Image: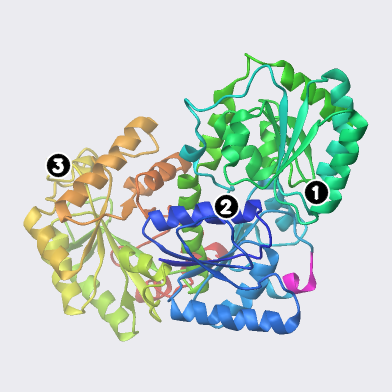
Amino acid sequence: MNILHVLSQHEVTGAETYAAVLADNQVGAGHNVWIVSDTFRIRTAAQVQSLPIGKRDFLQRLSNISTLRHIIRDNHIDVVHAHSRAASWVSFFATRGGNVPLVSTLHGRQHAHLSSRVFRIYGEMIMAVCEDIRDHLVRELNYPPDSVSVVRNGIDIPKWRSEGESQPDPAANIISLVGRLSGPKGILAERIVREVLPEALRMRPDIELHIVGHMNDSARFLELVAMMNQRLGGEKVKIIGFVENVKEVYRRSNLIIGSGRVAMEALATGAKVIAVGESNYLGVISKTTTTGALETNFGDAGVQQAFDALRMTADITAALSVVHGHDVEFGQNIICKEYDINKISQKVIETYAEAGAIKRGVKEIPVLLFHRVTKGVPVGTRHGIYVTELEFEKQLAFLKRRGYTTLTFTGLKQILEGKQKMPARPVMLTFDDGYEDNALNAFPILRKFSFTAVIFLIGNRTIKTNEWDVKDGEPELNLLNDDQVKTMDAYGIEFGAHSFTHKNLTEIPLLDAEKEIYKSKTAVAERVRKPVISFAYPYGKANEDVKRIVHDAGFSFGIASDSGPRNISKDFYEVRRIQIFPGAPWLSFWKKTSGWYHKYKRIV
């Protein structure tokens, strides 16, 4: 995938750091990545181009839009990912009229500008870095809930792990205030120096405050620090400024004060952290403050609170008094669970796919569900999971006359990634269980009309018949053999997994469900000698735990039966299908392949 990140940066911020970490992870995963920004100081494996995105005069914005259009066209960009309001604004107009989706990551609350309301400048999908920002966008700016998700500000955890490295000196009391020292955070830093430090020194005279971060207006801050040191009778405040190896700052400090990425990175190293940001004061990160920290991005979001210098002073002295009882693993476990860039990057790619689906009109694609195609009406069956050869041929002839094109899930994935266009009238033909008559009866008819299909196979090769249905009194029927699978695969029939032994995954222990899913993926992939990207839930039954396992196993799609959203792009792990029954009238088949059947069913 070709990915373009757009930022408006004049100094190092959490947005820039996150974009760099995400871009490097994407490059490592094999994607081609470009970054366009005013400035970009962090080293990255992506290709960086300077462009004054943050300049807001009208002519410059027109120039930025034109330049972005050229970058998108010349580099065959598949998705644009903006990381600020200014970046979203120019990216929105650069992607209009084309096939390239726009997504935005929002790191803070947004003002309700007229342009935001009129144009929905944040694109097809929005990723909020915490719950407060998501709720703000939905409740206060009226963004549709299904267009906004929480995708946290991921970090490269191994980079910050610090086993065997330098440790803070227990005899020292170095507090490092880390972060951008301009704008609201600069004002916050000044208040900490003016109001908190003198009170903290009365209780702990050995405290030393280090100021770490980039500042635009350094003269004013230097003047403040000089004045405070003179007043306090010693060099109690030191300005360290911007440092590349901030990890060493975290490791050597007895306490870190910061918000957003600073808090995350420091916790990952095992440091003690007081979270205070532009909006909120959380205090020392502990079991009682973790939920609030996650919801507000460690204080950078949420309803504005009054600054409480006395509370912060008490928290500082209490935190410094804990020398040997600090739970290093507690903070590290939070970061591993919530902020691992590998997990975050996967969520981002899924969001790209959903945005691509919306942009390219992947909505109610008719996904038809078949099981068997029989010579005539079968004897002894009670389930009605068949159509006859005559019915199937008439149905495919109907689709051919009306200009339908059959899709596989591999084809759908390529459409989502922008590698091919959505056909004017798409339809998906799927078959569960892999009955032998799929090869004997259905396959010749598919070839006659130059159609393809997706067949979901049981993973266990020792299962040769439909033994799960025989227990319910159904006739015993053969499943596809290896030669039949090989022949159909060579033609273009796609094969997916249908569990290992056809158990209802919602009725067995999760560990057993996990084995059914993982083993089936491996077995079917070995059988067809190619990646398997889709999994059909036995009996069409899935729940959130089962869907999560299918996702974690590396499937791109989870296929249900009568459950799932109408719009396929809203949940790729519960794709709703339309079952085709024998003897159905032509009006029914027309409705089921119309592209609005699910909507119709909800109405009636």
Q: Are marks 2 and 3 in contact (CB under 8 Å)?
A: no
Q: Quadrant of the C terminus?
A: bottom right
Mostly what secondary structure, the magenta segment? Answer: helix
- Packing grade of label 2 (10 A; few <14, some 14-19, many >=20) is some
Q: Which numbered dot is residue 463?
A: 3
Which mark is first along the chain, 1 or 2? 2
- Whole-Å distance between the Cαs marked 2 and 1? 20 Å
Q: Which residues are magenta?
A: 112-117
**Three-letter amino acid code at disc 3?**
Ile
Left or right side of 271 for 257: right
Q: Are marks 3 and 1 in contact (CB under 8 Å)?
A: no
The residue pinned by badge 2 equals 18
The residue pinned by badge 1 equals 186
**Image location (x, y in percent) of residue 167:** 57, 24
**Three-letter amino acid code at disc 2?**
Tyr
Name the one closer to the observer, 520 or 35.
35
User: Which label sits in the foreground, 2 or 3?
Assistant: 2
Query: Which secondary structure, mark 2?
Result: helix
Which mark is first along the chain, 3 or 2? 2
